Image (spheres, helix red, strand yellow):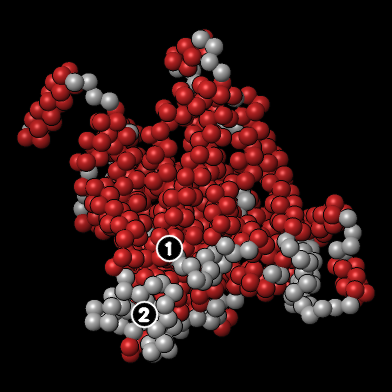
Amino acid sequence: MLNYIIKRLAIAVPTLLVLIIISFLLMHAAPGGPFTSERAVPPEVLANLEAKYGLNEPLYKQIATYVYNVVFHFDFGPSFVYKDRTVNEIIAQGFPITLKYGAIAFVLAVLIGVTLGVFAAIYHNSWLDYLAVGVSIGAQVLPNFVMAPILVLIFTLWLGWLPGGGWQGGQWQFLVMPVIALATSYMASIARITRSSMLEVLNSNHIRTATAKGLPTHTVILRHALKPAMLPVISYLGPTFVSMITGSVVIDMYFSTGGIGLWFVNSALNRDYSVMMGITILIGVLTISFNLLVDLLYAWIDPRIRY
Amino acid sequence: MRIEHEKLDGLADRMVEAEVKGRSPWADARKRFAHNKAAMAGLIVLILVGCFAAFGNLIAQYPNDFTDFTIMGRAAELGQPSFANGHYFGTDDSGRDLFARVVQGTQISLMVGVVGAAIAVIVGTLYGATAGYVGGRVDNIMMRIVDILMAIPYMFVLILLLVIFGRSIGMLFVGIGLLSWLDMSRIVRGQTLSLKNKEFIEAAQATGVSSFRIILRHIVPNLLGVVAVYATLLVPLMILTESFISFLGLGVQNPNTSWGKLIAEGASTMQYGTLWQLAFPLFFFVITLFAFFFVGDGLRDALDPKDR
C-alpha cells in the first residue's frame, strides 16, 4: 500500500510540473507582453515594469523562479490587471465560495444518485426503476449551462421564488439554483452507474447465498450488496469531481456567485495571465490529489486489489 | 414458455440462415441495430438534423447576418416566430433571423463534434495501437504521457489556449483535438494488447510484414467496432465541450455562432420575454445529444452482443 502511494506520488509530481511549465510557456508564447495592451509607456517605464515582474530575466530562470515560488511558498505572484492584488488574494476570495456550493453539489449528487440507483435496482422493472432510468437519461443532455437558464426561467422569472444570482455570504436562497444546476447531470450519471452495478451484484452468487440462509432483505442489501456495488461508483468520483470544478466556471458566470470560475473567465477576457495560471495550477493540484484519494479509497474498499 | 419458443425459433432460423449464406459480423450487427427502436429513432433524428444543417439555408428567408432594423431592440413585441414575415423561429434582440442563426449554429456545432471525434479517432487509434503493439518500454512511456495529460484540467488549459492564440474556430478545433484522443488511445491500446497475440498477427510477422503495416492493415481494421462505438459517443461530448466554451463567450465569435452561443444569448435575453431565443437552439441541442447517445448505445449493443 505504501509502495502504491509512493508510486502514485511519483506520477503526480511530474504531472504538476508539466502543467506548470505548459501554462508558463503558453503565457510566454502569447503575442505581446502583459503591458502592451495599455497606452504606450516610455521604454524606461516598461523596463522598470518588466524588472519588477522579473520579465527581463532569461526564460529558464523565470520558470525556475515561478516553480520555486509556487511549490515552496504557494505564491502565484501578482495579478497583471488588478495591480493592487496578488493572485493568492484573488484565490482566497473566490475559492471558498466555489468550495461551498461545489461541496454541497458533490455530496448531494453522490447521495441522491446512489440512493436512486440502489432503489431502482432493488425494484427492478417497477415504476420507480423506469422513473430513475428516465431521469438519468434525461439529465444526460442537461449539462450545467442548460440547467442554469432553465432554473432561472422557472424559479426566478415565472415563480419568483429565488433570486436569479448573487451570493450574499451564501444564504440558502442563493445556494439552491447553483447546487441544482451543477449537480443534476452528475447525479443522473451516478444513479445510472449505481443501478447497473447493483443489478449485477444482486444477481451474483453471494447474494443468493445470503438470501438463502434467511437474512432479511435490508441486511442483504446493506451488508452484502452495497459495498461491491459501490466500486464502479467510486472510480467515477474522480472524473465527476473534475467536471464539477469545470462546471463551476459556468455557475460562477451565470449566477454571479463570485467564485474562482468568475475570476478565471474574467482574467481570460482581460488576458490576466498570472491569475489564469494560478487558478489552472490550483485546479490541477486539487484534481491530482482528489484522484489519488479516490484510488486509495478504492484500494481500501476492495481488498482484492494489491499493489 | 411462449418467449422461449420464440427464442428457439429465432435461433433455428438464424442457424439455417447462417448455413445458407455465411454472414459477416457487420451484417449481423446491422440487423441487430435495425431492430433497436431507440437507436433507429436516434439515427432518424440525426439525419433530420443533418438535413436541417445542410439545406436549412434554402428555406431561410433571410441570410444569417441580415439585421432587421425595424425589429431591433423590440424583439419582444415584433420578433415572435411567425410564418407571415418569414422569421420562422422569430428574431434575436438585434433583429437577426433566428432560423438562419440556428441553421448556422447547427452547422458549426455538428462540425466541431465530428471533426473533434475524427481527430480523436485518427490520433487516438494510431497512438494506442502503436503503444499496444510495440509494448515494453515504449508502451510504458507513451502511456505515462497519456496519464500525465489526462490529469491536467483540460477545460482550463483549453481556455488558456483560446485566450492566448485567439478565439477562433480553428483554434477551437486544435484545442479540442489535442485533448480528445486521450481516452481513445487508452481503449485502443487495451484492445491491441489482446489482439497482438492472435495467430493472424503471428502469421503476418512470420511472413515478414513490417510492424507499421501490421498495425495499419491487421490491427486497426479489427479495432473498427470499438472505435466506431466510442467515436459516436465522443461526438456529443465534443459538442458539449464546444457549447460549454461558447456559452462562456470564449469559443465561437460573431458573426459565427453555435448552439452554446445561441443558448447563452437566449439565456441572457429571456427576462424580456423572448423565450423562443432560448427554446429553439435548446431544442436542437437536446434532441441531437439524445440521438447521439441512443445511436452510440445501439451501436455498442449491436457490435458487442454479449455485453448487454
- The residue identified by callout 2 is B91
Q: Is residue B65 visible?
A: yes
Of residues B187 and A168, which is closer to you in this image? B187
Residue at left 19%, top 41%? B35
Residue A38 placement (x, y as % from top left): 77, 77
Q: Compared with residue B13, is residue A256 higher up or lower down, i.e. above or below?
A: below
A69 left or right of A160?
right
Residue B5 placement (x, y as % from top left): 8, 30
Q: Compared with residue A276, is residue B226 higher up or lower down, i.e. above or below?
A: above
Chain that bears disc 2: B
Residue B171 placement (x, y as % from top left): 58, 57
The residue furthest right is A44
B136 left or right of B110?
right
Chain that bears disc 1: A
Q: Quadrant of residue A8?
A: top right
For the C terminus of chain A, the quadrant is top right
Q: Which mark is residue A143?
A: 1
Residue type pointed to by label 1:
Pro
> In the image, which is nearer the foreground, mark 2 or mark 1?
2
Tell me the SS state at disc 1: loop
Residue type pointed to by label 2:
Thr
Residue at left 58%, top 44%? A296
The residue furthest left is B2
